[in-house]
Structure formats: C-alpha cells, structure tokens
Amino acid sequence: MPYFAHRRLFLCLSSLLVSTASAVVEVSLSLSVPSNAPELSPSLLSFSIEGDRWTDWTGTTSKNQFLYNALDNLKTLTGVPPSIRIGGDSEDHTNFNPNVEFSEAIFPDFSTTVPYPEATNVTVGDGYYETARFLPSGMRITWGVNFGQDNLTAAFLTARSMAKAFSSPAMKDAGVTLDFVEIGNEADWYINNGARPSNWTSVDYTQEWTEFASNISETVGMSSTSHTKFFVGSFITSSNSTTGFSPQAIYAEGILDSEPGAFITTFSQHQYSGVFSEGDEDLLQELMTKENIRGNLSVHSTDIAVTHSRGLDYVLGEANSFANHGVSNVSNTAGAALWALDYTLFASQLGISHVFFHEGVGYKYNFIQPVELTRSILDGSALPEPVAPHVQPPYYAAIIIGEAIGNSNQTQAVELSIDNSRISGYAFYEHDVLVRAVVINSQAYMKAETTSRSSTHLDLGFLGESESRPTTVQVKRLAIGHADDDSGLTWGGQTYETNDARAQGELEIETMQVASGLDIAETEAVLLSFIY
Ligand SMILES: *[C@@H]1O[C@H](CO)[C@@H](O)[C@H](O)[C@H]1NC(C)=O
Ligand SMILES: *[C@@H]1O[C@H](CO)[C@@H](O)[C@H](O)[C@H]1NC(C)=O
Ligand SMILES: *[C@@H]1O[C@H](CO)[C@@H](O)[C@H](O)[C@H]1NC(C)=O
Ligand SMILES: *[C@@H]1O[C@H](CO)[C@@H](O)[C@H](O)[C@H]1NC(C)=O
Ligand SMILES: *[C@@H]1O[C@H](CO)[C@@H](O)[C@H](O)[C@H]1NC(C)=O
Ligand SMILES: *[C@@H]1O[C@H](CO)[C@@H](O)[C@H](O)[C@H]1NC(C)=O
Ligand SMILES: *[C@@H]1O[C@H](CO)[C@@H](O)[C@H](O)[C@H]1NC(C)=O
Ligand SMILES: *[C@@H]1O[C@H](CO)[C@@H](O)[C@H](O)[C@H]1NC(C)=O
C-alpha cells in the first residue's frame, strides 16, 4: 500500500506552517533497490586538470596543502579520492627535456574573454610526473601524451618519464597509481586546429593511434595483467554512427582488435553544454534546466550501449558547463553547483561511470582554485589584492555526491520519477536498502528577482513491501542566497570557503517525520537520510 494514505492528515498542518509553499510534489521512493539501479563508483565525480600548470596544483618540492585538503575531504566521504586525468589542450603541445626540473610553459597573452589561456608550448622533465606523489593515497591518475604534434619521440619520452615516476618507491609509498594513459586530446578536432589535414578521418586516427599505442604500451609495461591501461577516444564530438569520429566508428575500424587495442578498457567522451558566450541573461537557468541536462547527456546513449557491449567502461573524461573555461557569472556560481549535482547523478543513470570535471588555474568553471590568483577570472583585470586558494560553488556538488554515495563501497542509485520540470531527485541504496535521497530544485532564483522566493512541498511516499520503513528523516540543505552568487553557500550550515578547504561552522541537520514531508526552495538541494 502506498504510504501517501498515512500522511494526508499531516499535509494540512504543514501547509499552515509553511505559507510560502506554492506547490506540492509527490516523491515516491522504492524501499528496495530497483533492478535497473546502477552501482556508483566512489569516484563518480572526478577531475580533469589542464596539464600546463599541473605542478601549481600538486606543488613542486612539497605538497600543495590546499589541494590536498580539498581532495581529502572527498576521500573521507566515500573512502576513495576522486580520480584525476591530466591533459587537455596543452597535452598536445607537451614535449620532454631531461634538463627541465618540473615544467616550463609558454603562454599566449591573456584577454578579457580568456583571462588564463592554455600554454602553447610545455616542456616537462621527470619532476613533473613525480609530483603526483603529493596527492592523497588511493589516488588514481590518467595522464595524456602528445599525439597532436605527431611526434612519437615526444610521446615516448614523456611516457617513459611517467612510467619511471609511477614505479618509484616514493610514488608507491604515496599510494598513487597510474590507471590510464591517454594518447591525444580531442583528436576529432585536429582537422579544425590544423594538427591534421582536413581529409583526416577516424580510419587515420585508428591507424596512427595504434602505431603510437604499440610504442607506449611497451614503454609503460602494459600487459593483460598490468594495472595501467589505455583510455581511448577523448573526442569532443560524436557522430553516433559507424562513420565520422565516434566510438562506434573506431570499434568498427578495428581499434580494439589491434595488439595495443587489447589494453583499452575505457572510452572517454568530452562534453560541454555549449561554448563560451557572454551576456545571455537566461544562460544560467538554461544550464540548470532539468530537460537540458537530460538532453545533453542522452545524446550519448547509443555510444554508451555499444561501448558496454564491447566490455568497456564509458566515461566523460573531460566535461564542464561551457567550453573555453566557462562563462562569467554562470559557470562560477551557485546555480552551476546545482547543475553539476544533477548532471553527474543523471550521467550515472545512463551508465557513465565517471565524470571528470575540467579545471585549470583561473578557469571560471573550477570547483577548486588551487593557488593564489592576481587577476580576475571573469575579465582578466588586475585584482586589488591577490585572492588566496579557495573553492568555488561547484565544489559543494562534489561534497554532496560524496555524502550521498557514502563509504559502503556498494551504493546503487536510481533517478526518482518526479513530475515537475524543475525538481529532480535520486534515491541511494546500500545493500538493497533505501538509505538516502538527493532532491534538487533548479528554478534559478536570481539577484535581480523582484518576486519572493517560492518553495515546493515534497510529499514523501514509499513503494514496495519491506519489513521496516523509515519514519524519520534527517535533512541537510545546500543553502544558497541566489543562483548567480559566486560565494556564500553553506552545506548543512557549514562552509568550505575557508583558507584550508576544511569545513567550518556548526553542523545543521533537521530531523523530521517522513509523514510531514519537507519544503525545498527555488535554487536549493537537500540530502535526506532515512532513519529506520
Ligand atoms: C617549445 O619550447 C622549447 C623550449 O623553449 C623549444 O625548444 C621548442 O622548440 C618549442 N617547441 C615548439 C613546437 O615551438
Ligand atoms: C618508441 O619510439 C622511440 C622514438 O621513436 C624509440 O626510440 C623507441 O625505441 C620506441 N620504443 C618501442 C618499444 O617501440
Ligand atoms: C620531436 O620531439 C623530440 C624530442 O623532444 C625533439 O627532439 C624533436 O625536435 C621533435 N620533432 C619535431 C619535428 O618537433
Ligand atoms: C589528404 O591531404 C593531403 C594534403 O593535405 C594529401 O597529401 C593526402 O594525399 C590526402 N589524402 C587522401 C587520402 O586524400
Ligand atoms: C544542452 O544544454 C544547453 C544549456 O546549457 C541547452 O541550450 C542545449 O539545448 C542542451 N542541448 C541538448 C541537446 O539538450
Ligand atoms: C543513434 O543512432 C541510432 C541509429 O540511427 C538511433 O536509433 C539512436 O536513437 C541514436 N541515438 C541517439 C542517442 O541519438
Ligand atoms: C559579473 O558579475 C559582476 C558582479 O558580481 C559584475 O561586476 C560583472 O559586470 C559581471 N560580468 C558579466 C560579464 O556579466
Ligand atoms: C569495493 O568493491 C569492489 C567491487 O565492487 C571490490 O573489488 C573492492 O575490493 C571493494 N573494496 C573494499 C574496500 O571493500
């Protein structure tokens, strides 16, 4: 019997208490795990870091304690730190020189629209790879090598240095491992950026990839039993067909059947919701909108199914809100935190095992700014005072996902069917039992809003038979002033916007009867923990 029957009495009372609640939405949760609920990786939300300033993230001769803490917070929640992929545009401009200690990069001039551009030329030495030892133990790394410049010697020398770093006693003591090597970033874009002629096709990609991979697999000691394997693809487009650049095309062209192709265990797709554009007032709401999130991710459904049928894992190896480092006052805001939360959890429902959010020093869409900045991330203007390392609003999405997954090492999640265009939700199960739920209200409440902020009442009901059903629920809220705020969020009363990335403030957890339901405001997310 549905639980709704029991709570009719309470509805009158709760709507008297909360006069702003303008609508009621039914949220039905299955007590036992639905058969289609995927198991979530504890590192579902991971990071991709632009390679040109990698040692700014880690530190060179000692660890960057701020980054370490920001990652360690997440590790504490699930037991496993987020994975990190190092690559991006600068990956295809990286070469090796044994006389360079860490790395030397040449940057183009910055502009108001691109305040922190990628380096056009990066030269690295052994110390560049060795700094990965400063990351939290359990960290799993994916590292890209240069394919764009079609210089096998450059790829070989960097891969050899990488292999040396990861087999060193210092790295083994640190507990940091190399999961994957990636050969080239967005090779499907080479015909646009001049790295390959305009007649270059996925057939050429497959053949050249195989040649590079033969060398690199031997150089890093890949075998059927080695821990390190290949990521393949890292395309920014997909034709969803067996022609053009797509997973379906390269599988059909035999990439998996080649000798090094046997070491491919993952296909990586890149994904942004659009490209850089300023001045669209509705952009933040469009980003947050439930239907758009589903639209942007569902285009990959067939590629995911085909990838799984080949026995491979499918990841978004580089993703974020808007390409070219994000959009000012959109990508760096609280609304983008709600976007990242819904986006990552929805991705898990499609069979995407990891979403690597792209980051670079000074990028607008960062979760973490790992070093002091002296110019504005929004327009490149000189800041009156340097800004210390800090987390940006999307970081809270990583924390919430970590708490929702927890450290059971066997958490499954399913999207809740909620009949509302602004409210989405997910239920989390440990060992078949409903333990938590996340609900997101993605109606953007902006600073310029003149009407009062509305709330929606969530009417909780349970489906299915179970020996016991929860009667009490603990609620943590992601409190946000406005969708376009770039700071000042709190999670369960606590802030992570501190000088050491550790949480500060009194923990605020509301305990309520399941039967009374709860309200969720515009631009808010809640985590419900069920008490049996
Ligand atoms: C990159 O910089 C290095 C060091 O300055 C230089 O030797 C090399 O020629 C440059 N490479 C390219 C492709 O410009
Ligand atoms: C890889 O390529 C480099 C540069 O051409 C070469 O020196 C090295 O011997 C090659 N290694 C393997 C295992 O093919
Ligand atoms: C390829 O990389 C090697 C190793 O750094 C370098 O010596 C060589 O000049 C590069 N070739 C070209 C064409 O840039
Ligand atoms: C592709 O274009 C290059 C010149 O840019 C030419 O040398 C090559 O033959 C072309 N390949 C094919 C298959 O047409
Ligand atoms: C992707 O999201 C953007 C907004 O961020 C939206 O404009 C676009 O229509 C979405 N694309 C699809 C295919 O849903
Ligand atoms: C991909 O293409 C197939 C075959 O045309 C089609 O059935 C499917 O709906 C497409 N998938 C997506 C996600 O567009
Ligand atoms: C972004 O917001 C700031 C205020 O926080 C404002 O000064 C700036 O003009 C805005 N930039 C854009 C591009 O809208
Ligand atoms: C977590 O689960 C995986 C398989 O799902 C297993 O391989 C691994 O050993 C487990 N880890 C722990 C710490 O229990």
Image: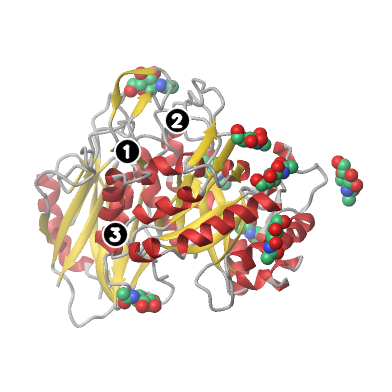
Q: Dot 3 lies on which element?
A: helix
Q: Which residue is mark 2?
A: 282
Looking at the picture, tell me which residue is in the foreground, 350 or 417: 350
Q: CA distance from mark 1 to mark 2?
A: 21 Å
* Mark closer to the observer (1, 3): 3
Q: Nearer the viewer, mark 2 or mark 3?
A: 3
Give the vertical position of 193 relative to 129 (above or below): above
Quick one: label 1 or label 2, which is nearer the N terminus?
2
Q: Amino acid at mark 2?
A: Asp
- Image quadrant containing the N terminus: bottom left
- Residue at the image position 14 percent from the left and 73 percent from the top: 532
Residue 183 x/y as whole percent: 62, 55
Q: Is residue 254 above or below residue 495?
A: below
Picture residue at 76% right of the left edge, 43% below the top: 196
Which residue extends farthest front?
99
- Mark 3 residue type: Lys
Category of crowding for the residue at label 2, using alpha-carbon neighbours closer than 10 angstroms: few (below 14), some (14–19), many (at least 20): few
Q: Which quarter is ligand 6 in?
A: bottom right
Of the numbered discs 1 and 3, the one sitting upstream in the chain is 3
- Residue 392's tag is 1
Quarter of the image where one finds residue 121: top right
- Residue drawn at x 50%, y 41% is 103
**Which numbered dot is residue 75?**
3
Q: Are circles 1 and 3 on residues that touch, CB within 8 Å? A: no
206 vs 66, left or right, is: right
> Marks 1 and 3, how far apart in space?
18 Å
The one nearer the camera, 66 or 279, is 66
Mark 2 or mark 3: name the one nearer the start of the chain. Answer: 3
- Residue sitting nearer the eye, 200 or 166: 166
Does mark 2's beta carbon lie closer than 8 Å to ligand 5?
no
Mark whose residue sits in front, 1 or 2: 1
